[in-house]
Amino acid sequence: MNGEIPVKRAGRSGRWRAISAAVIAFIFLATFLASSLVVIDQTEVGVVKILGKVQDEPLQPGLHVVTPFITEVVRMPTYEKTMEMVGEQHIKALTSEGLPVYFDMAVQYKIDPLKAPEVYSTLKNYEVWMESRIRAHARDIVAQYKAEDLYTEKREFIQSDFERRLDDEFRPYGILITAVLIRNIDLPESVEKAIQAKIEAKQEAERMQFVVQKEELEAERKEVEAQGIARANQIIGESLRNNPEYIQWYYLQVLDDFAKGDASVIVVPVPSSMYPGVAGNATANIPLILPSR
């Protein structure tokens, strides 16, 4: 009986060694696959580092196989992002008059997928570098304008100037500027009131100019209308002087309407030229037929 016990223990030990080896092999295989397979999302690009060296070609969205253990993949977003400098991080600058101005700024940008390795290797913490450059440009650009320019339609021009300058500097590094927005402008209260008063005065002047132009156009219209009426009266007068028979014809036409029951009778003085039977230039109180209303 003592001879059988060592045989059983040896069998159990062998099975445990086999199981342990299988588990180790499985873990090694899983680790190998996890290190060699990389999935890049649609909204990002992969920067490949082999033994710490950044490779020129980035990994595009999809499944990729890389050399395990010695390869590191850094994911960088390629969608449009917004860098905001608001609140305590707002922009402070001086205008061309030397007045201090504070404002919030939002810069929208995205990384060129093909230049992601260059962005990583050249800048790495690119947002820190971007913010310092944005603030420097803000001081330079605002110094070229007056305080009131930030309140008027020139603000769009200033924003476009910001966008152009930032894009010119950032694009060679692979960072594309899509928009720059200036908001919440804060000036000394006295300056702000003066600017507001100037804007209101300008608006009132434009309104008065519109009123004057409107009155001038109305006067021209009335003058043209009066000329038209005078010309029409002149034409009618000449026509009646040259065609007295027309008045008689019209009178007879009214008589015809009266006969049909479409007119009424009143008694008025009528020149002899309009009614047969009255001699000379005398007038007579005779019935005149007028259309009913």
Image (cartoon, rainbow, N blue to C red):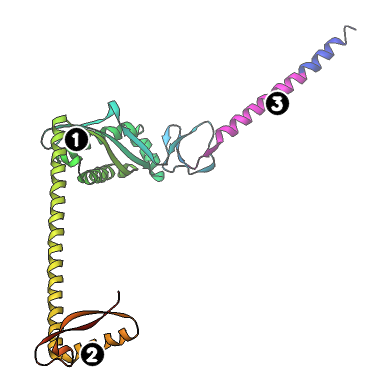
The local crowd at label 1, few if under 14, some if 14 to 19, many if 20 or more residues have their Cα within 10 Å, is some
Which residue is denoted by mark 1 in the rendering?
Answer: 139
Amino acid residing under circle 3? Ala
User: From the image, which quarter does the N terminus lie in?
Assistant: top right
Q: Where residue 247 sits: x, y (%)? A: 19, 87
Q: Nearer the viewer, residue 255 or 16?
A: 255
Residue 125 vs 158, above or below: the answer is above
Which contiguous range is marked in magenta? 14-42
Amino acid residing under circle 2? Trp
Q: Where residue 113 sits: x, y (%)? A: 41, 44
233 in magenta: no
Describe the element under mark 3 as helix, strand or loop: helix
39 in magenta: yes
Describe the element under mark 2 as helix, strand or loop: helix
Alpha carbon of mark 3 to alpha carbon of mark 2: how far? 127 Å
What number is the disc on residue 61? none
Which residue is denoted by mark 3 in the rendering?
Answer: 22
Q: Are marks 1 and 3 in contact (CB under 8 Å)?
A: no
Q: How many marks?
A: 3
Describe the element under mark 1 as helix, strand or loop: helix
Q: Nearer the viewer, mark 2 or mark 1?
A: 2
